Amino acid sequence: MRKIYWVIPAAIFFMSSCSNFTFKDIDEFEISEGLLEDNEKVKVIYNSGAPDDKLEVTYYRHLIVVSQESYDTFNLLSTGDAIVTKTDNIRYYIDNNSSVNLILQNLDKIQNGVNINDLSNKDIKKCGRK
């Protein structure tokens, strides 16, 4: 039986540009972590994109992904930004506690030359959705 979950990782490398966004407070979601393994392959079947291309991460993007291991479907909140097409939609899940996620959440700081040991996960309070 396929299950649908909400997951809050930090990043998956993809997204497309969009408009007409609404934002919801993160407290409106029932969040579960640890349902996907770091570097697990997922197929992206929906992504909300983002209203802007800023490096500073202030909100999550909404994605729906299917695990290519369990075939369970997950609602994913992600800080990642990249392009996904119908023929190029397999990505790797990046866990919220991974070094890669830490870097992706802080690209704005890294661009200005900061030591990675001085970075921390951002306290993001909203999710943008189409």
Image (cartoon, rainbow, N blue to C red):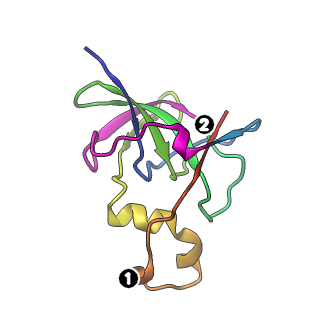
Residue 18 x %, y %: 71, 38
Q: Residues within 10 Å of mark 1 (few under 14, many from 20)?
A: few
Looking at this view, is 57 or 122 the one in front?
A: 122
Question: Which quadrant would residue 47 be assigned to in this image?
Answer: top right
Query: Residue drawn 41% across and 41% down?
Result: 31
Q: Which residues are magenta?
A: 25-48
Residue 119 x %, y %: 44, 76
Mark 2 residue type: Ser
Question: Which quadrant would residue 120 be assigned to in this image?
Answer: bottom left
Q: Is residue 46 visible?
A: yes
- Residue 124 vertical placement versus 130 (above, below): below
Instruction: Name the disc covering residue 39, or none.
Output: none
- Residue 22 vertical placement versus 111 (above, below): above
Q: Which residue is disc 1 drawn over?
A: 117
Mark 1 residue type: Asn
Q: Are marks 2 and 1 in contact (CB under 8 Å)?
A: no
Task: Locate residue 80 relative to residue 127 in the image: left or right.
Answer: left
Query: Residue drawn 59% across and 72% down?
Result: 108
- The N terminus is located in which quarter? top left
Query: Residue drawn 52% across and 69% down?
Result: 106
Residue 67 x %, y %: 31, 31
- Residue 97 vertical placement versus 103 (above, below): above
Q: Is residue 83 visible?
A: no
Which secondary structure lies at badge 2?
loop
Residue 75 x %, y %: 45, 32
Looking at this view, is 118 or 40 the one in front?
A: 118
Looking at this view, is 30 or 90 the one in front?
A: 30
- Residue 127 vertical placement versus 65 (above, below): below
Residue 59 magenta-highlighted: no
Query: Residue drawn 39% across and 42% down?
Result: 91
Instruction: Name the disc covering residue 48, or none.
Output: 2
